[in-house]
Amino acid sequence: MKKIILIFTIGILYFTCEAQTKDDLQSKAEIFSEKTGTLIQKEFIDIGTLKKCKIQVVRFTDLITNAEQSALKFEYELASSTSTEVKNTFLDADELDGLMKSLKIILEKINSKKPTNYTEIYFRSRGGFETGCIQNDGVWTIYLILQKLDGERYVWITIADLPILYNLLEQAKDKL
């Protein structure tokens, strides 16, 4: 009987963890923007583009209470022969410093001694944005993921792109 209860409990935990969807990965700004019973204004401020990934500051304002929430938006158009799909994600203002520190560390790791084993380094936001690098056979591959659980949302960047991305984030920080 104990084995059945244990197996049942493990099964429930497994399916609960697997049931996470895109909706579970929301930034504070997205949650704020989805409030009902109020009037929301969105202001989009262009920061720049890196590898066809558009970076913007988005300010959400509740026009009834004057409450505000800002975030960084990453947007990428994925074009196929039949259609164009827009992929995007948000990084909350309070997560930007962590991302910038992470990018500095990633740049230091890449330029330092190469690991002998397969290695992954990554930063994840609450809204599903991820950046990091993978080292395999002495070669570092750097990426941005614009939505977790979707393999098509990768933006591949180079070591030379990291300072450009950092500069864009500095510009965005001044406007958040």
Image: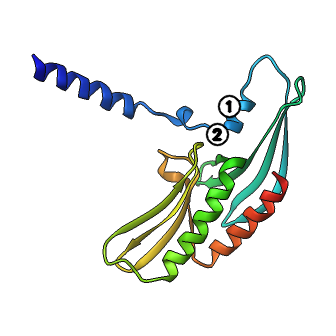
Quarter location, residue 171: bottom right
Quarter location, residue 172: bottom right
Look at the numbered disc 1 and give the secondary structure of its residue: helix
- Badge 1 vs badge 2, beta-carbon distance below 8 Å: yes
Type of amino acid at the residue the image marks with label 2: Ser
Look at the numbered disc 2 and give the secondary structure of its residue: loop
Q: Quarter holding the N terminus?
A: top left
Q: Is residue 9 left or right of residue 68?
A: left
Q: Position of residue 122 (x, y in %)?
A: 49, 60
Dot 2 surroundings within 10 Å: few (below 14), some, or many (20 or more)?
A: many
Q: Give the residue number, with chain letter if any, for mark 2.
A: 27
Distance of mark 1 from mark 2, alpha carbons? Answer: 6 Å
Figure label count: 2
Q: Is residue 128 left or right of residue 32?
A: left
Dot 1 surroundings within 10 Å: few (below 14), some, or many (20 or more)?
A: few
Q: Is residue 125 left or right of residue 47?
A: left
Residue 75 in view, yes or no: no
Type of amino acid at the residue the image marks with label 1: Ile
Which labelled disc corresponds to residue 138? none
Q: Give the residue number, with chain letter if any, for mark 1.
A: 31
Q: Position of residue 10 (x, y in %)?
A: 24, 29
Q: Position of residue 138 (x, y in %)?
A: 38, 80
Rendered view: 109 above or below 44: below
Q: How is the image coloured?
A: rainbow
Identified at 83% across, 58% down, the residue is 174
